[in-house]
Amino acid sequence: MQKALLIIDIQNDYFEKGAMTLVGSDQASINAGLILKKFRADHLPVIHIQHIALNPGATFFLPGTSGAEIHQQVNPEVQEKVIVKHYPNSFRETGLYDYLITNGITDLVICGMMTHMCVDATVRAAKDLGFNCILIGDACATKDQEIFGKKVKAQDVQNSFLASLDYFYASVMTADQFIHSDDHSR
């Protein structure tokens, strides 16, 4: 069993004054930073996913902007892998799968943004591709959504997606639970 940390899209546009501010992005990034610190201390692989928007009409993560840069809370170190993606699923048209297989990685600890979009798509794809997943729920952030003309608060969106993923696709834990568990599973 080889474990790696996968940090998805913790980028400047998701923070205050960014082009797509999320609810709870500051606290989520702090918790992701704690997990990152543990992986670095344990000398385990870390993979950063960076979304760069190429589709016409995109309003955030635009190429060459400070908003597309990885947030300072989880800034990559030189030896850490950075994979650029253009779709919500971090595996789609990227080298992520090949990188994981080449490095013998079987287990992923995942955190990032947005829970309802890129985190959800990546966790589901990872499980379908045969990886064991732990999702650090409080190291993820999302935003209010709307359906049938009704607003759904970010916390409800967050809880619904985490609950759905916890059923089959991942073991959902808090940063504190993960850091203080011996085997890093339930």
Image (cartoon, grey):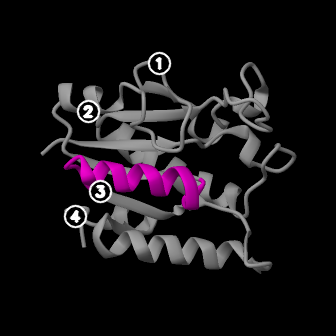
The residue beneath circle 2 is 100
Residue 127 lies in the magenta-colored region = yes
Circle 1 SS class: loop
Q: Which tag is nearer the camera, tag 4 or tag 3?
A: 3
3D distance between C-alphas at marks 1 and 3? 25 Å
User: The C terminus appears in which quarter of the rendering?
Assistant: bottom left
Q: Which tag is nearer the camera, tag 4 or tag 2?
A: 2
Q: Is residue 138 left or right of residue 141?
A: left
Q: Which mark is residue 182?
A: 4
Amino acid type, mark 4: Asp
Q: Which tag is nearer the camera, tag 1 or tag 3?
A: 3
In-front residue for pair 150/5: 150
The residue beneath circle 1 is 78
Percent across and percent down for residue 46 are 38, 35
The residue beneath circle 3 is 133
Residue stretch in magenta: 114-133
Amino acid type, mark 2: Leu
Please, what is the dominant secondary structure of the magenta stretch?
helix
Q: Earlier in the sequence, mark 4 or mark 2?
A: 2
Q: Is residue 143 left or right of residue 136?
A: right
In-front residue for pair 133/147: 147
Q: Marks 4 and 2: CB-CB under 8 Å?
A: no
Q: Is residue 9 left or right of residue 2?
A: right
Dot 3 crowding, Cα within 10 Å, few <14, some 14–19, many 20+: many
Identify the image quadrant of residue 75: top right
Spot the residue most to the left.
1
Q: Which tag is nearer the camera, tag 1 or tag 4?
A: 1
